[in-house]
Image: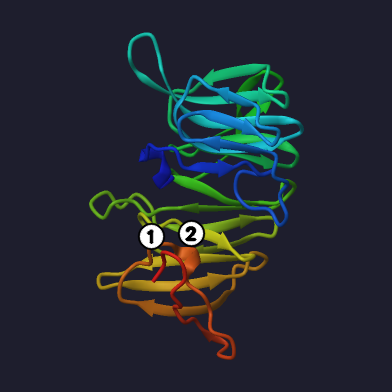
Amino acid sequence: MKNCKLLFGLFFFTISIFSVCHATPPISKKWYEDGKIVSSSGKKLQLDLQNAYDGLEYKNKIYIVGFKINSDGINTPQIVEVSEDLKEIQYWTFDSIINDVFVYKHSIYANNIAGKVFELTGDSWKEANMSFPENSQVVFSDGMEQLIVCHSASAPMTANHKGGCYSISPNWRYDFTWFDLAPKVCGGKLYTYENKVNGGIFRVLSLESGQVLCSKILATPPGNICDIEQKPGRVGTCFSCPRGTGL
């Protein structure tokens, strides 16, 4: 589950054509954790959402994931579809927290924390013929064939499954134990951090093959996994370099 699901504030996020990673996404809308959307022209729309935490813009529509308090005072998971001109709004209520909304094979999908995947068909969401491990996050989508899905390891006392990442077309899998620091695509590569008893291991994986390009033992988890850089000239070894809020 994304850490930002538990955060409340007015930090904004720029909506790209995919909710996860794309090479050169267009910038046309900004959305905020309080459910506000602002267009490039300055037009504003306040959604009936609390704690918006994921979103994408695709085919002239905007999709925002968050929570809405119903008439009984219960915080319910929602996906909201908004038209390009911010005039038409459609809300859908889900039984379980939605982790991501993403594009796959030119269609809109969403996955919940239990691993169920839903496809938007017409005006309704239907369970798709694929599923993910529980607590999965879609960290990369090219909108067509390739998805990279990462799932955290179960708590040590439950031991339901190990953590790791895997790709759909091209097919590869890399297993490692992670709990809170989710893998991210940084500069066209997959950055991961494996939890160990003392510290952990930082690795950079190829998006195309899942091959480990380099690795480095770290004494403590990085504040931001994308702030770890590789020092050129040493193939197979990663070096931590301070940048921004990282190490």
Q: Which residue is at 41% across, 64% downward?
A: 245
* x and y percentages locating residue 212 in the rendered image: 55, 75
Q: Are marks 2 and 1 in contact (CB under 8 Å)?
A: yes
Q: Is residue 1 visible?
A: no
Q: Which residue is at 33% across, 10% downward?
A: 72
Specify the amino acid type for callout 2: Pro
* x and y percentages locating residue 15 in the rendered image: 62, 41
Taking depth in this image into account, of 231 and 169 the one nearest to the observer is 231
Q: Which residue is mark 2?
A: 183
Within 10 Å of disc 2 (Cα), the crowding (few <14, some 14-19, many 20+) is: many
125 over 29 or under it: above or below? above
Q: Which residue is mark 1?
A: 178
Q: Identify the mark at residue 115; answer none if there is no mark.
A: none
Q: Which residue is at 50% across, 54% downward?
A: 150
Reading the chain from its start, which is encountered first: label 2 or label 1? 1
Asked if residue 86 lies left or right of residue 4, the reply is right
93 over 200 or under it: above or below? above
Within 10 Å of disc 1 (Cα), the crowding (few <14, some 14-19, many 20+) is: many
Tell me the SS state at disc 1.
loop
Q: Where, by quadrant of the figure, is residue 50 drawn?
A: top left
* x and y percentages locating residue 207 in the rendered image: 64, 64
Camera-near label (2 vs 1) is 2
Asked if residue 185 lies left or right of residue 246, the reply is right
Tell me the SS state at disc 2.
loop
Q: Is residue 155 visible?
A: yes
